[in-house]
Amino acid sequence: MSKINKTVLAMALALPLCGALSASQAHAAPLGGCAVENAKVEVIGQGEVKVMPDRVRLNYSVSSIKPTAEEARREVEKTVTAFADAVKGLKLEDKAFVADSINIFPHYVYNNEAKKQELQGYEARRNVDIKLTDFALIGKINDLAMAAGINQIAGYEYSVADTKKYEHEAAKKAIEDAKVKAQLLADGFGVKVGTPCNLSFQNNGIAVLRNAAPRAMAFAAAAAPDNSVPSTYSVEPIVISSSVRAVMNLEEK
């Protein structure tokens, strides 16, 4: 291969391919040329696996505003206790019901006439999480929450208990994707892929599926006052992704 052809090859390798593939600038050779034995290709391989979740965490919240802090606290504690007692009948797993510490703070309302904030009582708030593996119980637990006096649904979080095998599967797909991209780029410019010189994983992660449920539980109660309408919840797959960066040497064919 002539020096002119080698220079053209090095310039071509520096151009991106379809925005997804790129070649690194070759090391400078004497007389400003570029030796093909020093040329490299850099690619980013992507891989992902979609898997249906097998567990969910239901997030609830109860709040109460009363003239005194003690009254607000008692009201919230009464509601959470009633909810916990009702859920016991479902025989969930140990530690499935988790209630956070109660928070109490002053409740101020702005007085337009006085042009200032005025103390109107105290608000108590407590969050409750329930972990489930049986999604069919979601509707039932929502009914129990409303009956107990829980007044907010903070949302649902779906996840997968054992992610290792799916992480490995996504990583293998990312590696294969990097190989295909490197080979495609090399074939396009008439060279071949040599030995790897830099390999690393990047931005691996698991997307936790969050489903924002209606904030006001009274809305759900008003929609089905006779409690005879079954609740249905559609669950989407969770995406487990992997990304790999590969820098490969290029050789003449």
Image: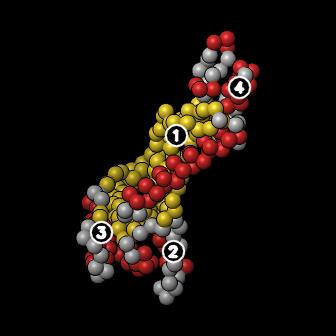
Q: Residues within 10 Å of mark 4 (few under 14, many from 20)?
A: few
Q: Residue furthest top?
A: 31
- Reading the image, the residue beneath label 1 is 245
The alpha-carbon separation of the residues under discs 2 and 3 comes to 20 Å
Q: Residues within 10 Å of mark 2 (few under 14, many from 20)?
A: few
The alpha-carbon separation of the residues under discs 4 and 2 comes to 65 Å
Percent coordinates x, y for residue 162 in the rendering = 37, 62
User: Helix or strand or loop: what does disc 3 sit on?
Assistant: loop
- Mark closer to the chain start, 3 or 1: 3
Please state which of the two labelled residues, at mark 4 or mark 3, is closer to the viewer: 4
- Mark closer to the chain start, 1 or 4: 4
- Reading the image, the residue beneath label 2 is 233
Please state which of the two labelled residues, at mark 4 or mark 2, is closer to the viewer: 4
Residue shown at the point (35%, 68%) measured from the top left: 131
Residue 124: numbered disc: none
- Reading the image, the residue beneath label 3 is 96
Question: Mark 4: which amino acid?
Answer: Met
- Mark closer to the chain start, 2 or 3: 3
Question: Mark 3: which amino acid?
Answer: Ala
Percent coordinates x, y for residue 19 in the rendering = 68, 40
Question: Mark 2: which amino acid?
Answer: Tyr
Residue 199 left/right relative to 102: right
